[in-house]
Image: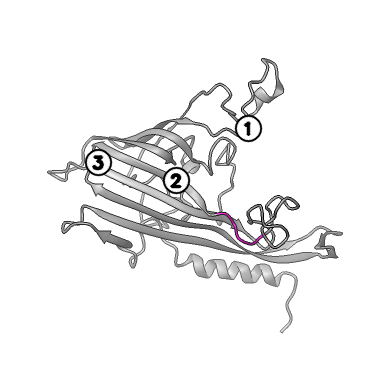
Amino acid sequence: MGLSKNTPGALLAGIMVLFGSAVYGQGGSPTYQDGMTVKLDSTGKKYIRFLIWSDFMARYTRLNPGTAVNGVASDGMFDFSVRQFRFAVYTQLSPRYLILATVGMDNQTFSSGGTAGGGNTGNGGASFAGTLGKKPDIYVHELWNEFTVVPDNDFTTKKPNFASLYIGTGLHYWVGISRMSSLSSFNFLAVDAPLYNWPLIDNSDQLGRQVGVYIKGKIGPVPYRWAVNKPFTVINPPVAYAANAPELNYAVDNNAEGKLSTTGYASWDIFEQENSLVPYTTGTYVGTKKY
């Protein structure tokens, strides 16, 4: 059986539909239940929970006439990539104290994702600026701890409180400016994020995260989050630009003056109350919830 130029795209679309039929929103899978959870006491109120997820992508790209791949003229090409990998762990050490950490990697393809310093063996080095494919960096995406001042549900009666308040510190994802600025990477509404939803991605933040202090909670049907952070510097050493310098128009804070940044977001849950234990907003619940 022969394959036409349109066959790769059709096959990929079929694979996406096949896998897409098994996708659930956060907490929506009937087989997931408590996930990988280690209880630290007999009541289950103290626990450690582990989450692991990864995105694999297969692509076929039609190329412009005259395009060369590794010096060979080509009108199209396949490639595969590990779009992202995450290992997250959070622990409820007491009813009022939670710690969360996430490590992972992004964008390992056949030609990009490697770390610098490996010469021409697949780790980039000076000649390739760390862009070759093998051995990508695994780094800390976030690490924060949180104290419950007023819980969502009363500790004694278990009934919902009208208002709640949590305070946290660390490298965190409780940010604005929109819902998609802190969206989850394991339940996108589309195949992937458009990336412009993170306006300063990896400039003054670390993949959307910054170091600081945040508060979050709800007031009636309105969940809220607000933070004061220290933006990452991107210039070493920091430079104090002149008053009329064009660099002052850039959307990047190089922290020459040591200023802080603020960020926040609030929404209105019209129907059901959305879970806000973790900052990752859900792209789609696939019809299992209504907001």
* Magenta stretch contains residue 208: no
Of 254 and 270, which appears nearest the observer?
254
Q: Is label 3 in a helix, a strand or a loop?
A: loop
Residue 37, x across and y down, in percent: 30, 61
Residue found farthest to the top? 243
Q: Which is closer to the viewer, label 2 or label 3?
A: 2
Residue 34 visible in rendering: no
Q: Is label 1 in a helix, a strand or a loop?
A: loop
Does residue 286 appear left or right of residue 9 in this picture? left
Q: How many marks?
A: 3
The kind of residue tagged 3 is Asp
- Which of the 4 image quarters holds residue 58? bottom right
Q: How is the image coloured?
A: one colour
Residue identifier under label 3: 152
Q: Residue at x 57, y 54 (%)?
A: 137
* Magenta stretch contains residue 135: yes
Residue 285, x across and y down, in percent: 41, 55
The kind of residue tagged 1 is Asn
Number of the label disc, if any, that sits on residue 140? none
Q: Residue at x 64, y 61 (%)?
A: 109
- Which of the 4 image quarters holds residue 89? bottom left
Q: Earlier in the sequence, mark 3 or mark 1?
A: 3
Residue 59, x across and y down, in percent: 65, 64
Does residue 105 appear left or right of residue 265 in this picture? right
Number of the label disc, if any, that sits on residue 236? 1
Q: CA distance from mark 2 to mark 3?
A: 23 Å
Disc 2 vs disc 3: Cβ atoms closer than 8 Å? no
Which region is colored magenta?
133-137
Residue identifier under label 2: 142
Does residue 110 appear left or right of residue 194 in this picture? right
Residue 99, x across and y down, in percent: 33, 46
